[in-house]
Every structure is written in structure tokens, then in C-alpha cells.
Image: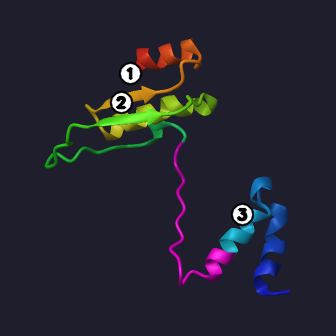
Amino acid sequence: MNLSNKLINLLRPIAPQKFRNAGLKFYFNAWRNRDKFFITSHLRPKFAARVNVWPDELKQTPKCAIIIQGPLLRENNFTLETIRLYKKIFPGSDIIISTWDTEEKSYVKKIKEKY
């Protein structure tokens, strides 16, 4: 058994369930082949309130619009928090939501009222 497999077997019991098999193997293989790839990882806050944005007074943000297309994700208020984050990062920009007619009307109304 090679070193990678030994480490995977050692970490498997303490790794989160969905990460135990494919995730561990993926990251160890990526690490082993790090001379051929860049390895990146991003942790993003769930709530826009946790993101601080400092405006650059020397830079003017260009006028733009952001289009969010697809289903509205209500779990953890994902769509609402995404809109809040974009409003912080791109102040003054229009945000366009393009979704299905079958979306829950009360949730669509909540988004329109807030933004």
C-alpha cells in the first residue's frame, strides 16, 4: 500500500461523510501531481453581512448589470444572500433575476421588495 492510500485510510474516519471517498482521493492525487496543476480552494461566507467591501475612492465602478438566471434557491437564503453580496461589491449596478414562471410568487415578491 503506497503512502497516499495509507493517508487516505488514516483520514477517512474523521473526514465528513460526503468527502470520505472521492474527495480524499481527489485531493491526494492533486497533491501528488501538484507540479502539473494549480490547486485552489475557496471558502465563501453564507451571509453577505460577513463580507466587508472597502470602496476605492480612486476607482470608479463602471455601470453594469448582473443577470442571475435559473431556479431561485431558498435553502440558506442562497439567492437573497447572493443578491446582497452583489449589491455590496457592485453598488449602483442593476441586478436582473431571470427564472421560471412556476417559482413561488411570495419568494419572488420578497426579492423584489428587498431589491
Q: Secondary structure at mark 2?
A: strand
Q: Residue at x 55, y 12 (%)?
A: 106
Q: Secondary structure at mark 3?
A: helix
Q: Mark 1 highlights which residue?
A: 115
Q: Is 35 part of what is drawn in magenta?
A: yes
First in sequence: mark 3 vs mark 2: 3
111 to 13, vertically: above or below:
above
Q: Mark 3 highlights which residue?
A: 23
Question: Residue 21 versus residue 88: which sits nearer the camera?
Answer: 21
Question: Residue 21 versus residue 65: which sits nearer the camera?
Answer: 65
Amino acid type for the residue under numbered disc 3: Gly
Give yes or no for contact between labels 2 and 1 (Cβ–Cβ under 8 Å): yes
12 to 100, vertically: above or below:
below
Distance, label 2 to label 1, CA atoms, is 8 Å
Q: Position of residue 34 (x, y in %)?
A: 57, 80
Q: Position of residue 17 (x, y in %)?
A: 80, 54
Amino acid type for the residue under numbered disc 2: Ile
Distance, label 3 to label 2, CA atoms, is 35 Å
Q: Is residue 21 left or right of residue 42?
A: right
Question: Residue 33 versus residue 8: which sits nearer the camera?
Answer: 33
Q: Residue at x 42, y 32 (%)?
A: 84
Q: Residue at x 46, y 20 (%)?
A: 111
Amino acid type for the residue under numbered disc 1: Tyr
Q: Residue at x 30, y 38 (%)?
A: 90
First in sequence: mark 2 vs mark 1: 2
Q: Mark 2 highlights which residue?
A: 95
| Segment tinted magenta in the rendering | 29-45
First in sequence: mark 1 vs mark 3: 3
Q: Is 53 part of what is drawn in magenta?
A: no
